[in-house]
Amino acid sequence: MFVLALNFQNVVPATANSDQLFDFWTTLLMLAMLVVLALLLLVGQFLKRQPESVFDPAIVRTFNKRVVTWLTICVLLVVSLLFNRTVTVVLFGLISLWALREFITMTPTRRGDHGTLAWLIFGFTPLQYIMVAMNLYDFYTIVIPVYASLFIPARIAFTGDHKRFLERSAKIQFGLLICVYALSHTPALLYLELETYDRVTQTKIPWTGKTAGLLFFFIVIVQVSDMLHFVWDRLAGKHVIAPGINTTKTWEGVIGSACCTALVGILLQFVTPFTWYGAGFMALIISVMASSGSMTMSAIKRDRGVRDYGTLVQGHAGVLDRIDSMCFAAPIFFHATRFFLNAN
Amino acid sequence: MKQVTVPFLVMLAKVLSGATVRWVDCEPDTCQRVYFANHTSHLDALVLWASLPKPIRALTRPVAAADYWEGGPVRRYMAKSFNALLIDRTKIKVHNSPIDMMIRSIGDTESLIVFPEGGRNHQPEMKPFKSGLFYLAKKRPDLELVPVYIDNLNRVMPKGQFLPVPLLSCISIGAPMWLESGEKKVSFLKRARQAVLDMKDGSDNEF
């Protein structure tokens, strides 16, 4: 309790002077993002009305589904940010729960795992996001990778069911790590206190921008990367990376989207604390991680014999399908930013 | 009171089970039906009932075990809210068989939800059906018998657990069937069980 109280004291002044989450550039990027998504939505509706011979209806459907999910996520994000950071954290917590729900539904578990799963949903997930909202960096970086990974096998062992023990523990741990731990680094961006290098005085000065801009930068880059990956695969894709896992993902897609996304990153440098080459480099990392994320999730889906998490249970929008790239990129982007620019 | 708690209960059941309802070769209808389903969780009756469209729900009564649903005021209240027809499994007598009770209580407007496996099943394999469904069909041949497969709900809340884990489940409702004239009990029950199994799609998520 003493530790918590101390940390609170550290947090309070930071919250007080950053109650305004938006500045001019952040608002600009936010509006641009919404306008572009709305335009894409219109384009999608237009494509849907075209004769089937011109555009493959399956591709148009995938495109529309993606745009709708992303638009929903972005609108929710903007609305939550209009309140405050805590509401945004809660929003991501709910997204995590939904993704975890999809992941566990697809992953075989046994009856003995029920208690462990209840701990995940009612224990570790809320705890992780509460710690993010309290800015307890030292705790939220280790609770799931260390404590939960010890807790999960032990909890399963105590139920006495040894069948496929290691497999079950690993699956549950992996689901928690990807859907909750990794994703929680996205709202955690809002709590970073950063400093930039001032060329004139040659000293480090506190960054005056808004961390909401950093969050938008990240989300826009992930979306752009996903989209460019799709475009490069269609237009220039020749060398399929792993046909056994995903027949559409190509090396051209990975490299092409990484390079183009880096250029977009440089263009969006104005909302970030990075230099122009820093922003390009970060966008490059995000793009590579996003590609790795969707490859990994494809491998899991292939293993389970489902095409996407959305069709796993008919009628549900597959949240995990949309955020898999974000999950992989979030911790890396968070730590890279923190490593280079952290103020403390 | 009921106007508030019933929609709340329905919403809770839907959120916890994340249930998708697939009507396969069957349309929602208020005609008298007997929905028969596999039974793997306490939540089965509630979730299946909640996933029916509202006008049908108002005319449908799940048949449930009195010993579970009368255990405690909360459960009793819930059973009352979703209009359950409670059967006391310990007091079954020849002159007051549960089948007669069911037929009497539905009159000529209501439908039933039954679980012909008897008790809840904890094995991955479905148990053979008890003969109740056969006698019900014999006494009321006009009832549409609708097979339902409930998938994944056993993982949401298995036996003996207190907290439900809100995973996604799926309810598949199949084509209505009837008792053929002169059909034997054993072959009818087998056919009915197979009709439920046919609604199952995808792989097992419990091993």
Image: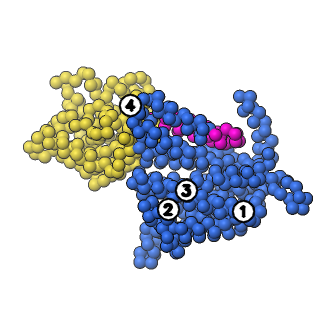
Chain colours: A blue, B yellow
Q: Which secondary structure lies at badge 3?
A: helix
Q: Report if residue B78 lies within the magenta region.
A: no
* Image point (72%, 54%), residue name: A337
One can see residue B61 in this view: no
Give the Cα separation between the discs numbered 3 and 1: 21 Å
Q: Nearer the viewer, residue B47 or A294?
A: A294
Q: Which secondary structure lies at badge 4?
A: loop
Which residue, given by chain and number where applicable, does mark 3 sit on? A293
Give the Cα separation between the discs numbered 1 and 4: 53 Å
The nearer-to-camera label among 3 and 4 is 3
* Image point (63%, 70%), residue name: A260
Give the Cα separation between the discs numbered 4 and 2: 38 Å
Q: Same chain for the residues at labels 3 and 4, yes or no?
A: no
Q: Main secondary structure of the magenta part?
A: helix
Q: Residues within 10 Å of mark 3 (few under 14, many from 20)?
A: many
Say which mark, if any, is on residue A105: none
Q: Same chain for the residues at labels 4 and 2, yes or no?
A: no
The nearer-to-camera label among 2 and 3 is 3
Give the Cα separation between the discs numbered 1 and 2: 29 Å
